[in-house]
Image (spheres, rainbow, N blue to C red):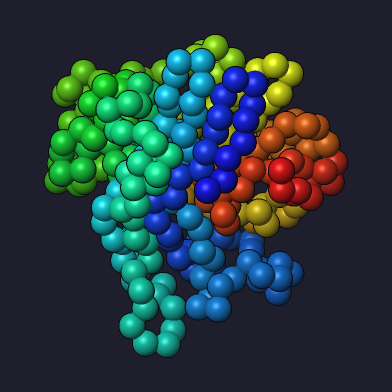
Amino acid sequence: MQRITVGGYTIEALTDGLVRLPTPFFPGLDPAEHSGVLDPDGTVHVPVGGFLVRGRGRTILVDAGFGPREMGYPDGMAPAGGDPAPMGVGGDLLTALGGAGVRPEDVDTVFVTHLHSDHVGWLAPEGTPAFGQARIVHGAADWQPLIGGLPHDDWSRIGLEAVRAAGSIEAIHGDAVALAPGITARHTPGHTPGHYVLDVEADDERLVLLGDVIHTPVQLRDDRVRFIGDHDPDEAARTRQRWLAEIAGTSTVIAAAHFPGMEFLRLDPDRTPRAV
C-alpha cells in the first residue's frame, strides 16, 4: 500500500481493481515512442480505486472505485489472441479500506472527483448506500451531462440516486471549496464539466490528488496524448498543462487516479516523475 503524510494528514492509496485500456482510448499515443506503456496483452493497464485521507479528526475517501462488477470491451476493441479477460474488474475497495483499519461507517466524507462509473461504484451497490455516515461530495456541473441522460436502470445512476434519496449528497460549485482544515476542492473542468482535484496543504507541505486530470504518466511529458473519455478534450488539455506547469519543479506531491501502482510522485522541472 502506498502511503504518505502531509502535515497532520495521512493519505493512502486503495486499489479496487484494474482496467485494460486499448490504445484507441489514448488519441495521439505512439507506443513506439513510449517504452513500457503497453502490457504484453497490447493494452494500457490502469488501476481503479481511491485515496484515504485521515487526520485532524477526519476520515475522507477520495473516489469510490468501479465497484463489485466487470466491464467488457467496446465492440471491435478486444485484444487479439483468443478470449480476453474483461476490460475492467473491480470489487476490492472495501477490502483495502478494511486493511487500512477503516470501516465504511467510519468514513465521514466521500469526495468524488467526478461522476464517471469507475469513481462512483461503491457509493451504493445495488442501490444500498455503502457509507452510511458520510456526505457524498461532487461537482454540481457533472450531474446533468453525466447522470441525467443515463437510463434509469444504469447502475451508476441507481447508486447516485440512492445516496441522493438518502440526503447524503452535497453538490459543490466554484473554483475552491474548503472540505476540511487545509483541504480544498479545486475545480478542474475538461475531463468532465464538474471535475475537481483535492488540494491538501498543511505545515508547509502540499499534496494534490489529480483524479482524471491526467490518465497516464506518458501525458506528463507528451502533450499530444489525450484521452477518449474527455468531455471537452481542448479544455482537458489546457487544465492538464496548467496544473503540470504549477507543480513541476516544486516540492508538491501528486497522485493520479490511474497511474500504475497509484504512486505518490514529485515532478522535476521538465516534468519527469520521481517517486516520493
Is residue 51 found left or right of 265 in the rendered image?
Answer: left
| Percent coordinates x, y for residue 261 in the rendering | 57, 54
For the residue pair 2 and 88, the one nearer the viewer reads as 2
Q: Residue at the spot x=26%, y=52% of the render? A: 68
Is residue 89 found left or right of 201 in the rendered image?
Answer: left
Q: Residue at the spot x=34%, y=55% of the render? A: 90
Q: Residue at the spot x=51%, y=43% of the render? A: 13
Is residue 179 found left or right of 101 in the rendered image?
Answer: right
Report whether residue 193 is seen. Answer: no
Q: Residue at the spot x=39%, y=36% of the render? A: 101
Does residue 119 sit above or below 221 in this rendering? Answer: above
| Percent coordinates x, y for residue 246 in the rendering | 75, 30
Q: Looking at the rendering, in which quadrant would you find the C terminus? A: top right
Q: How many marks?
A: 0
For the residue pair 129 and 226, the one nearer the viewer reads as 129
Asked which quadrant contains residue 126, the reply is: top left
